[in-house]
Image (cartoon, rainbow, N blue to C red):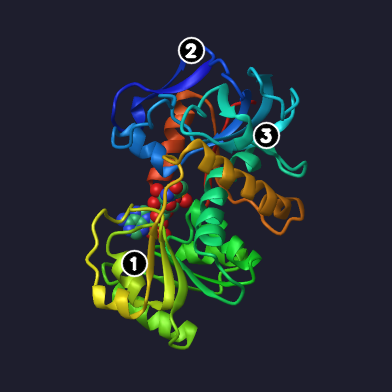
Amino acid sequence: MRAAIITRPGSPEVLEIQDVPQPQPGPNEVLIRVHATAINRADLLQREGKYPPPAGASDIPGLEFAGEVATNGPGASLWRIGQRVFGIVAGGAYADYVIAHERTLGEIPANLSWSEAASIPEVFITAHDALWTQANLRAGENVLIHAVGSGVGIASVQLVRARGAVPFGTSRTADKLDAVRPFGVEAGLCLPGPEIAEPLKDFSNRVTGGRGFDVVLDLVGGPYVAASVSALAQRGRVMLVGTVAGQKAELTLGQVLSKRAHLIGTVMRARSLEEKIAAGEKFSKEVVPLFENRILRTSIDREFPFTTEGIRDAHRRLGSNKSVGKVVVNLKG
Ligand SMILES: NC(=O)c1ccc[n+]([C@@H]2O[C@H](COP(=O)([O-])OP(=O)(O)OC[C@H]3O[C@@H](n4cnc5c(N)ncnc54)[C@H](OP(=O)(O)O)[C@@H]3O)[C@@H](O)[C@H]2O)c1
């Protein structure tokens, strides 16, 4: 089968489509013929040699896919051959075939195309797990989403609205704030320079009437973490999901104490199989029906073909910080 291989750590040029052996499904696993996959920040780090796959995962990059069931492994019985499925894996989705545990898969709603379906799992499972499950988001709460024009950001805006809460967003790029408004952002704050804390405090006071944000979904980390704590309501929750703005933060701990704040870090890829199954099952039950009812929609920035140049361009596009929403790669046609 064809697979995109990281030939050595480096820039997008190290990616190459090569012929590799097709993987064989083990007990309770399913072999899926991939129709489309999508690019994630973690793939860029993996390509640079900074984020190796967890033990036992494929060396082939790719964390999400939409495809059809090709073969059931021993004991796998939940899916019929040809059924349309999507999901997340710890690696291996940049390929004609990928293997996933049968209980981590979801059925693709009939109203979604292959590329739409491939743009959903990573960002919606991450956002749903962080906001609905871990932050226990409640109707009427105010939620701030940093890097709101990102793939996870746009998914989060919609999930906040679907919960009856109110989403606000920040971006370094004013155009992205305009682009995400149709998804339901109540108000946006552009943070183009190094000043974050003061403008964010003013914004928080203005849009929440001085109460602060009940939840901050921090997709960037670094200096945003301290600014987020300052802009937090009493008993607010900061969900730390990404660190593209930096690995280190300096916090005023008195603020964390007096606000009785919760600072919760989360990753999806390194979780145990049982935890991934639990997150996937909640996603299938609580989120997938909202796509069927068209309450949620996908946001595809660009699509690329599954060629060596296509996969390199897809990585360049996500790495440029110009994308709004998901970068998708089509394996068929
Ligand atoms: N924990 C998990 O399991 C998990 C899962 C999926 C994603 N993530 C993380 O979630 C974040 C969003 O992922 P995504 O795939 O949706 O990303 P994406 O679409 O590539 O967007 C990321 C955005 O972050 C902003 N950004 C980049 N560098 C920045 C910096 N130095 N300071 C401030 N903002 C910066 C840029 O938007 P602006 O122009 O608006 O600044 C960029 O478009 C990433 O950090 C990713 O690693 C974590």
- Measured Cα–Cα span from mark 3 to mark 2: 24 Å
Count of number-bearing discs: 3
Q: Is residue 222 above or below residue 310?
A: below
Q: Is residue 216 above or below residue 90?
A: below
* Mark 2 burial class by Cα count in 10 Å: few <14, some 14-19, many 20+: few
The earlier-in-sequence mark between 3 and 2 is 2
Q: Position of residue 272 (x, y in %)?
A: 47, 38
The earlier-in-sequence mark between 3 and 1 is 3
Q: Nearer the viewer, mark 3 or mark 1?
A: 3
Q: Nearer the viewer, mark 1 or mark 2?
A: 2
Give whichever of 208, 237 is nearer the camera.
Answer: 237
Q: Quadrant of residue 9?
A: top left
Is 273 on the left or on the right of 35, as rendered?
A: left
- Measured Cα–Cα span from mark 1 to mark 2: 44 Å
Amino acid carrying label 1: it is: Pro
**Residue at (47%, 88%) from the top-left corner?**
209
Amino acid carrying label 2: it is: Asp
Q: Nearer the viewer, mark 3 or mark 2?
A: 3
Q: Position of residue 249 (x, y in %)?
A: 24, 62
The earlier-in-sequence mark between 1 and 2 is 2
- Measured Cα–Cα span from mark 3 to mark 1: 40 Å
**Residue at (42%, 63%) from the top-left corner?**
146
Q: Which mark is residue 230?
A: none
**Residue at (62%, 73%) from the top-left corner?**
139
Amino acid carrying label 3: it is: Val
Residue designated by label 3: 85
- Tell me if residue 270 can be seen: yes
- Tell me if residue 324 can be seen: no
- Give the quadrant of the N terminus: top right
Residue designated by label 2: 19
Q: Is the CB–ligand 1 distance for label 2 below 8 Å?
A: no
Residue designated by label 1: 192
